[in-house]
Image: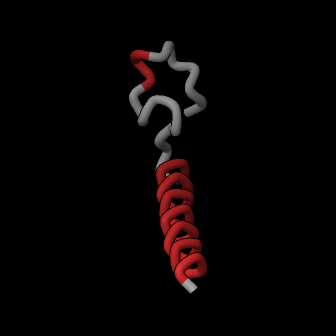
Amino acid sequence: MGTIVVLAVLAGIVALIVRSMVRSKKSGKSLHCGGDCSHCGGQCGH
């Protein structure tokens, strides 16, 4: 029973991380440079 609870918690955390990444990408922020392409040569896919 404890294993199921731990797996459910981990799955929830992963889902929140993925959701945050998708929202960042939709709002125009890059996952590589955080939306500031000045330090990565402008090649971060904006």
x, y (%) of residue 7?
58, 72
| Residue at the (50%, 58%) spot, across then down | 17
- Judged left or right of residue 19, residue 37 is left
| Residue at the (49%, 44%) spot, across then down | 28
**Residue occupying the far bottom of the picture:** 1
Could you tell me how many numbered marks the image carries? 0
| Residue at the (42%, 35%) spot, across then down | 34
x, y (%) of residue 6?
52, 73
How was the colour assigned to the protein in this rendering?
secondary structure
Q: Is residue 1 above or below residue 26?
A: below
| Residue at the (45%, 23%) spot, across then down | 37
* Quadrant of the rendering where the C terminus is positioned: top right
Closest to the observer, 10 or 24: 10
Q: Is residue 16 above or below residue 3?
A: above
- Judged left or right of residue 40, residue 18 is right
x, y (%) of residue 21?
52, 52
**In the picture, residue 15 is in which quadrant?**
bottom right
Closest to the observer, 19 or 6: 6
Closest to the observer, 15 or 27: 15
* Quadrant of the rendering where the N terminus is positioned: bottom right
Q: Is residue 17 above or below residue 8?
A: above
